[in-house]
Image: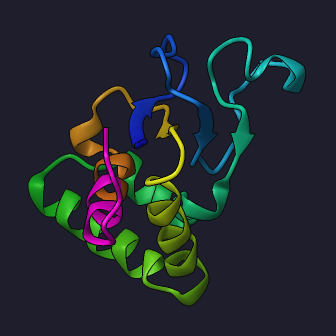
Amino acid sequence: MAIRIIRLGTARSADEGLRIGTVRRPPRGVPKAEFASQDWYDVWYPNLAPSVETMKRGQSVESDKDWAAFSKKYRSEMNEPDASRNLDLLAALSHQANFAMGCYCENEARCHRSLLRDLLKARGANIG
């Protein structure tokens, strides 16, 4: 059992399980009824997405310094009690079920999902 950190909209892997979209906004121009069939996500879970302000900061990253500032802000948001409990729950569930979480960004190294991976690992999640 494990969590896979993926890019939303990509083909699903075998045994991936439920796909969770940790994004602030649904995909543009896609009818809600087609989110799962088009491999976006099965469940929208913006609770673990960066806030709108932080998301905008992340989209404008041009340097390592910008990325560090975005990372610090996002990690701070994920340390808030509700987000922290969500991460704890998902880390625990990763030992009982297969599921995937992700975002739309092409480059994972400059996407909040890379930080999400680290936060989940720190909580003992089984990352696949």
Q: Position of residue 23 (x, y in %)?
A: 59, 47
18 to 95, vertically: above or below = above
Q: Which of 88 and 23 is in front in this view?
A: 88
Which quadrant of the view contains residue 69? Answer: bottom left
Horizontal side of 56 relative to 124 (left or right) equals right
113 to 15, vertically: above or below = below
Horizontal side of 19 relative to 122 (left or right) equals right
31 to 93, vertically: above or below = above
Total marks in image: 0
Q: Residue at x 63, y 24 (%)?
A: 40
Horizontal side of 57 relative to 96 (left or right) equals left
Scheme of colours in the image: rainbow
Q: Nearer the viewer, residue 113 or 67?
A: 113
Q: Which of 127 and 21 is in front in this view?
A: 127
Q: Residue at x 13, y 51 (%)?
A: 63
Task: Name the quarter where the N terminus is drawn.
Answer: top left
Q: Which of 126 and 112 is in front in this view?
A: 126
Q: Where is residue 91 in the image (x, y as percent from the top left)?
A: 44, 63
Q: Residue furthest left?
A: 64
Q: Give the range drawn in magenta.
A: 117-128
Which quadrant of the view contains residue 76? Answer: bottom left
Task: Name the quarter where the C terminus is drawn.
Answer: top left
Specify whether residue 123 is painted magenta. yes
